[in-house]
Image (cartoon, grey):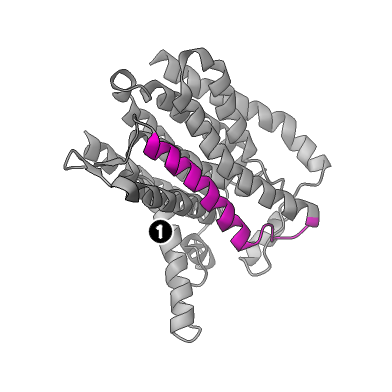
Amino acid sequence: MHTVILAVLVGFVAALGCGHFLIPALQKLKAGQSIREDGPKSHLKKAGTPTMCGIFITIGVLAAAIIFLSQTGSYLWYAVIGATAFGLIGFIDDLIKVLKHRSLGLKPYQKIVAQVVFAALVSVYAYQNPAIGSSLYVPILDTYWDLGIWYIPFTMFVIIAMTNSANLTDGLDGLAGSVTLVSAATFTLILFPFIEQTVWGEDLAVFAAAFTGAILAFLRYNAYPAKVFMGDVGSFFLGGALTMMAIVSRLQLLLPVMCIMYVVSSISCILQVGSYKLRGGKRIFKMAPLHHHFELSGVHETKIVCVYTIITVIGCLIALLMVN
C-alpha cells in the first residue's frame, strides 16, 4: 500500500516539475500547436499553445520506475517500454508538425506500420511469457479463455485500437487526460489483490499508480483553459499504457467498459466516414469525433469534459463490479 501511494506522489511531483521547467523552454523554441483549418473555428485561437507536453506523463512514470527499481521486476519495465514505444511514434509525429509548422506530421500509413511493428513485439513477448500467456480473463463468468496463437493478432488489434482511440479523444482541453485519469486510478484499485498473488502484481500496481499521479499533474497545465497540449506523444502513451496494464493482467476484455469514451470517439468517426462514403456525402454528425459535434452544437468544452468523465466513472464502477 505504501509503495503504491508513494508511486502516485512520485509520478505527480516528477510530471509537475517537468511542466515547471519545460514549458518555458517549449515556448522559447516556439513548439506550438498547429490547428487544423477544417476543425472547429473556436480552436484557431489555441494556435501556438505549447504541444508535445504529454512527455511530462512519460517522465513521471519513468521517474517512479527508476526510484522503485529495487522493489520491482521486469514487468514494470515491460509496461514502461511498451507504452513509451507508442509514445515515441507520437513524439516523431509531433516533432515533424513543430519543425514544419503544419498540422500534418507522419503520414497515416507510417503511423500504422510503426504501430503494427511495436504491437507485434509486445504481443509476441506476452504470448511467450509464462506469467501472461495466451489466456484472457472473462469478466462476470470468472474464468479464462485461451486464444492460443490467435492471442497475438487479437492483442495487436487491441493495442492499435486503444492508442488510436486515445488519440481521437484528445480534442478538447483536459478531455483525454480526465477520462484516462479515471481509468488509470481504477486499474490501480483492481491491481491491489494481485500484488500478493502474482509475480507481476506489484510491478503493475506501481506502474498504474505512477501513471495516475503523472496524469493528475499534467491536468494542472492542460485543464481548461489549457496552457499546454499533450500532443500525439501524450495520447499514444495514454492508450499504450492502459493497454500494457490490461495485457499483463489479462484484462483486455475490460478495456471497452473502462475506456467507454475512447470507444465512443472511435465509433463516431467510423460512422461518420461510413455515412459520408455510402450516403453520397451525407454526415451523421456536424464533426467527428463526437465531442466536436457537441462543441459545434453549442456545448461548452468544460461541460463536455465533465460529462465524458462522469460516464467514464460509471464505466469503471461497472468494471470493478465485473472483477469482484
Q: Residue at x 60, y 62 (%)?
A: 109
Residue 257 covered by magenta stretch: no
Local secondary structure at mark 1? helix
Along the line of sight, the residue nearer the viewer: 194 or 121: 121
On screen, residue 208 above or below 69: below
Q: Quadrant of residue 228?
A: top right
Q: Residue at x 57, y 20 (%)?
A: 66
Residue 160, given in percent of the width and then of the height, sits at: 48, 52
- Category of crowding for the residue at label 1, using alpha-carbon neighbours closer than 10 angstroms: few (below 14), some (14–19), many (at least 20): some
Residue 266, given in percent of the width and then of the height, sits at: 44, 60
Which residue of the protein is positioned furthest toward the right in this rendering?
28
On screen, residue 80 above or below 148: above
Residue 28, given in percent of the width and then of the height, sits at: 83, 41
Q: Is residue 86 left or right of residue 106?
A: left
On screen, residue 99 above or below 195: below
Magenta stretch: give its range: 100-128
Decide if residue 228 is in sight here: yes
Along the line of sight, the residue nearer the viewer: 229 or 307: 229
- In the rendered image, the quadrant that contains the C terminus is top left
Count of residue discs: 1
Decide if residue 225 is in sight here: no
Q: Residue at x 51, y 27 (%)?
A: 77
Residue 101, given in percent of the width and then of the height, sits at: 78, 57
Q: Quadrant of residue 1?
A: top left
Judging by the rendered image, the residue that carries numbered circle 1 is 264
Residue type of the residue flagged with mark 1: Val
Which residue of the protein is positioned furthest toward the bottom in this rendering?
280
Q: Is residue 78 left or right of residue 254?
A: right
Q: Quadrant of residue 19?
A: top right
Q: Is residue 142 left or right of residue 154?
A: left
